[in-house]
Image (cartoon, rainbow, N blue to C red):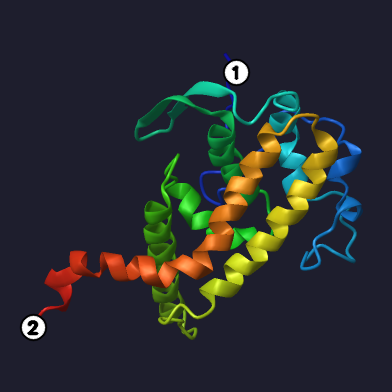
Amino acid sequence: MITFNVKLDPQSLDYILQIPRDNPQWTRLDYMVCDNCPLHNTDAVYCPVAVNLVDVVEAFKDTLSYDVVDVLVEIRERTYARQQIPIQQALSSLLGIIMVTSGCGSLDKLRPMVRFHLPFASIEETVFRVASTYLLAQYFRVRKGLQPDWEMKHLVSIYQNIARININICKRLQQATSKDASLNAVVILDTFAQMMPLTIEETLKDFEHLFTPYIKE
């Protein structure tokens, strides 16, 4: 049995690396820097996302993505369990949390979703959570005197940036692993990111009937 304890700062949701260690070459910022990286041309030596992924990647570097596992996810409020699922699916949920809470400026926009993370979410569940989170963010922007984006026009650009980051993380993992479990876990995350701009409007239309009590005369 392999156990991973994901520890986050209760206020900021920053990922807390529990065991200091030397970082491998593939975690260096200049090794495969994203073209939209806010840390580029700064004093930063390592990619914070890559650094926080090392422990998981090392644990599964010789694991095939289609190996099946039983998974138990325990959080403060409840427990989730899945049996006999491909390990890439289990790792995708774990890596997603770590990546979003590692201090990447582009991924930070997804941080509120980590607080109410839903392991093994479907595309419909993810669209619902993404749209709800984004619109709630606009509510808070209004309260701060900022311009809201009620039409969700900028949501597409957020996921386009995320997709570019996922591609570069995949390139790093190609050098860090001999098998494809961790690599394909990020590919799953990237599939969601790529699909989001294309499917969100149509998927939200499918939800409209659920809100009839709010929109009827």
Is residue 8 at least partly visible in the picture?
no
Residue at the far top: name it. Answer: 1
Q: How many marks?
A: 2
Q: Residue at x 91, y 40 (%)?
A: 25
Q: Quadrant of residue 94?
A: top right
Q: Which mark is residue 2?
A: 1
Which callout, 2 or 1, points at the residue further toward the start of the chain? 1
Q: Residues within 10 Å of mark 2 (few under 14, many from 20)?
A: few
Q: What residue would you read off at disc 2?
A: 217
Is residue 22 at least partly visible in the picture?
yes
Closer-to-camera residue (43/119): 119
Is 55 situated above or below 144? Answer: above
Q: Quadrant of the C terminus?
A: bottom left
Q: Residue at x 88, y 64 (%)?
A: 42
Q: Residue at x 35, y 35 (%)?
A: 77
- Label 1 secondary element: loop
Is 7 situated above or below 171? Answer: above
Closer-to-camera residue (163/25): 163
Q: Using the numbered discs, state the Cα–Cα distance from disc 2 to disc 1 in whole angstroms.
A: 55 Å
Kind of residue indicated by mark 1: Ile
Q: Position of residue 112 (x, y in %)?
A: 48, 56
- Label 2 secondary element: loop
Q: Residue at x 90, y 66 (%)?
A: 41
Q: Residues within 10 Å of mark 1 (few under 14, many from 20)?
A: few
Closer-to-camera residue (60/43): 60
Q: Position of residue 147 (x, y in %)?
A: 48, 86
Q: Quadrant of the N terminus?
A: top right
Q: Position of residue 188 (x, y in %)?
A: 58, 46
Q: Quadrant of residue 9?
A: top right
Whether residue 38 sits left or right of residue 13 in the image: it is: right
Kind of residue indicated by mark 2: Glu
Residue at the far front: name it. Answer: 66
